[in-house]
Image (cartoon, rainbow, N blue to C red):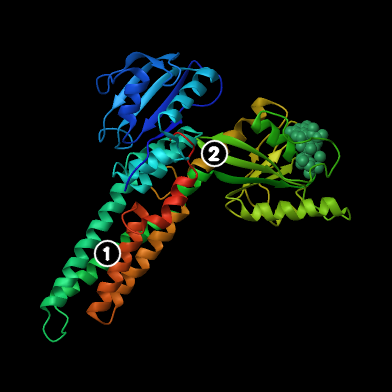
Amino acid sequence: MAFETIFALASGTGRAAVSLMRLSGPDSGAILDRLAQGRPKPRMATLRRLHDPVQGDVLDEALVLWFPGPRSYTGEDVVELHLHGGRAVREGVASALLALGARPAEPGEFTRRAFLHGRLDLTAAEGIADLIDAETMIQRRQALRQAGGALAARYGGWAERLTRLLAHQEAAIEFSEDGIPNKLEQEVRDGAAGLAAEINGHLADGGRSERLREGLWAAIVGAPNAGKSSLLNALAGREAAIVSARAGTTRDIVEVRLDLAGVPVWLADTAGLRDTPDEVEAEGVRRARRRADEADLVIAVFATDQPPDAATLALLNPQILVVANKTDLQPAPATIGGMKPVPASALTPQGLQPLSAALEALVAQRAGLSDEAGLTRPRHRAALTEASAWLNEAYDAALPELTSESLRAALRALGRLTGRVGVEQVLDVVFGDFCIGK
Ligand SMILES: Nc1nc2c(ncn2[C@@H]2O[C@H](COP(=O)(O)OP(=O)(O)OP(=O)(O)O)[C@@H](O)[C@H]2O)c(=O)[nH]1
Ligand SMILES: [K+]
Ligand SMILES: [Mg+2]
């Protein structure tokens, strides 16, 4: 495969003190020779004047780094130019690189090359994409773990075991007498069943790491005027939703993004639940119910100065967080609908304290924070589910050849996950959501 030499700005495009231009591919060294009159020592930051190859004028004085492959991010010859941050400098250097035969990189192309040159597997590449997008401390930790190869090690280990099982199965077929199942075959079947059980255990994590990557969905529901919008605003620290003394103020769903205990949470404010002849409000109530259905976490708000309303009481279950708001007016009752409410007052920071604490604890629990590397994407779940199903087929197969076939199919499913097999189909999915320059 012939690779072109690509370049991209690896830092942001705004005004900045320093911009990082990155170059990768077979001509990187030659381009650097022309641009900076020679290459510095490998991996040594060196100050150089960069010249326009056509007009010869000075483009910038830059810190230049030269990484000969394969010891580089992409595994190819890589050049890093730490430029002064102005737009004119960046554009001048980019034109020079174009003139010298490099082309602008596609999104994710640097990491794609790293993958193609065997520097990382697909799950690690995804980890890097997640690391770039990480917004909270715990997301960052999870992405770093994945980028560092935690999932690659686990899935790669499974693929190795599976490859061994397949080899043993082939041997068993080779040496079997009159098609009578032998001891080796039984061992392979047991191995397949054991591996399936392990994969199923990994799948049964309730989507913890996926949720951590995507964020948790929470919804506030309750009667009109319970103070839902006030609580949302207080939790968000800004006036995201309209608050008024008129019942039926909120109609559309208003969403804010919170960082609770390091977990990203989309918190939705919804219309107050009640029967209403108002068409628009009624649609709001329908949306509120739907959102409560879909949410990972539902917060049911009651106001202490009103008797609990039937519509909200009907939604209660042990998974729901029950809140008694407006405790500045009346103390919270001991129970609402048989559940112990968290007292709250949206009017003061102290009044919000118990609710914030309860939410953080619940979110940490729902996100199931653990140090285990869990699967983070639907792609992982699909491939593992398939592998596990094929392993069960391998165990149940009536003929040794069918066991082989099923093991091979399971291996293909695992291979798609790490990128060892069936790579073409998954590449675009994996690299599509990268940003340029990575
Ligand atoms: N005293 C007191 N008043 C509150 C509290 N929270 C909200 N309120 C008041 O209650 C009224 C309704 O508040 P909202 O936040 O609009 O209530 P809501 O549940 O969003 O109402 P809808 O959107 O109409 O369903 C407003 O006048 C708020 O100022 C509280 O903790 N204590
Ligand atoms: K209101
Ligand atoms: Mg409201």
Q: Is residue 373 visible?
A: no
CB atoms of marks 2 and 1 within 8 Å: no
Query: Horizontal placement of 13 versus 73: left or right?
Result: right
Residue 361, given in percent of the width and then of the height, sits at 52, 39
Q: Secondary structure at mark 2?
A: strand
Counting residues from the start of the chain, the first of labels 2 and 1 encountered is: 1
| 401 and 113: which is toward the camera | 113
| 404 and 60: which is toward the camera | 60
Residue 206, given in percent of the width and then of the height, sits at 46, 54
Give me the residue at 27% from left, 23% from top. 43
Q: Which residue is mark 1?
A: 194
| 407 and 195: which is toward the camera | 407
Query: Horizontal placement of 280 versus 198: left or right?
Result: right
| Up/down of 169 relative to 312, above or below | below
Amino acid of disc 1: Gly
Could you tell me which quadrant the C terminus lies in? Answer: top left
| 327 and 44: which is toward the camera | 44
Q: Which residue is mark 2?
A: 264
